[in-house]
Image (spheres, helix red, strand yellow):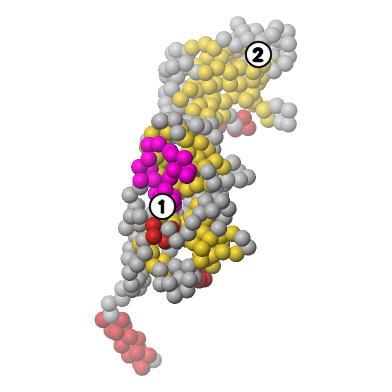
Amino acid sequence: MKNIAIIVIALAAILTGCNLEPDVAPMPTFVGEANTTIAELLAMHTIGSEDSYDSIPMGSNIIICGYVTTSDEWGNNYKYLNIEDETGGIQIKIDNKALYNKYKIGQKLYVKCDGLVLGDYRKLPQLGLWANGSMQAIPSFKTYLYLFPDGAPMGDFNPIEMTTIPSANDIPATNYNRRVRLIGATFVEGGIATFSDPGAATSHDIKMSDGTTITMRTSNYATFASETLPVGTGEITGILTRYNNYVQIVINSPADLVGFTIPMERQTVFSVNYANAFNEGWSQAGTGNDWQTMVNSSFSGFYITPVANQDKYLISPAIILDNINGPELSFTHRAPQGFDPNTMMCFYTPNYTGDVNTTLWIPFNLSAASGQTASNNFSIELPEGTQSTNFRLMFHTTSATSAWYLSDIKITGLVQ
């Protein structure tokens, strides 16, 4: 035991004297330099009427260098990355679904092109391999032969600003696969359509201020695919691409959209849990029979069976509407032996005092066909002045001769 204690003390002394710092991965460094610009590389291939390619011979020692401008982190770019230098841009096809972990936006990247193929897909220049009559991705396990990051990511590459969209053939091939910024752009379906349909990648037209148009292409696997396109006019930054004679733009994420208005969607901002309503803020006041709740397969809501000299109030909990645009109230009501608007009434207040008798209540005009037992739907947009943090509803029965049933009470509103 004495010997063990000596060993432990000795080890402690050794460890205490060491400077235990966490391991840090060395900064990637490429030994060499580029000898070809991206524009010079693109000039080595002539885009034909169909997908085509030109092999880059082994031993040609062609090296290009550019900065990464795309990211697949948000799922909108799949198995490729784009780089560009001051002369042009190129898309590099890579068989990897998480390239952003290694090749971040702004990363300086050298590419040894020997043995690769310079080709095109529907007239969009690409760098990769060729097989089965089309461009193919570089296998992920072979990227170490061709791609060489250098230094730390430097941030975004300055985009080319565009205020008009020329025809596809009037745009130089060197401008495709480059980062561009559309100035004065408007989504034709802004506020209506989502970025992508669920089943397939989707194209949406963008109209420029001069009337020219461009298409934005979004993958249905993008993390923002189900979000609604923004409204208004703003700026869109993305990669300029083409599909035959269609000019397109592809964004990395919605952060690439600036100056637009996020569309508001109508959502339910208040509803009732009838099984536990009186424990969740609903209250009663007045005289006569109480309001009851019923929850079964055929009905879920409030009901009351009034008696002579009935004067009963059903009051909602506070409903916060101060940040809600265009709030709308709706509910369904019915009286089995007929509805009487003089004895069955609905009110609201934006400022409840805590006392039903001292609160200023504003009536809604309810109606239903006399003598019918059918359900009647009531819906109204709440007027200005109701957007408060203390909005309340109140249902009032006096000496009615019929039971009254209320269900589907809810308020919807436009929220971002």
Lateral position of residue 259 relative to residue 92, left or right? left
Give the extent of the magenta segment: 160-181
How far apart are labels 1 and 2 at the CA level?
A: 80 Å
Who's the residue at 68% across and 30% down the image? 295
Tell me the kind of residue under disc 1.
Thr
Task: Give the structural element (helix, strand or loop) at label 2.
Answer: loop
Q: Which residue is mark 2?
A: 306
Instruction: Estimate the x, y position of residue 346 in percent, counting from the top left.
Output: 56, 14
Instruction: Estimate the x, y position of residue 303 in percent, counting from the top left.
Output: 65, 21
Tell me the kind of residue under disc 2.
Pro
- The quarter of the picture where the N terminus appears is bottom left
Q: Which residue is mark 1?
A: 174
Residue 71 in view: yes
Instruction: Estimate the x, y position of residue 242 in percent, counting from the top left.
Output: 50, 47
Magenta residue check for 388? no
Task: Give the structural element (helix, strand or loop) at label 1.
Answer: helix
Foreground label between 1 and 2: 1
Instruction: Confirm or deny contact between disc 1 and disc 2 (CB under 8 A).
Output: no
Between 221 and 410, the residue placed more toward the observer is: 221
Who's the residue at 58% across and 29% down the image? 272
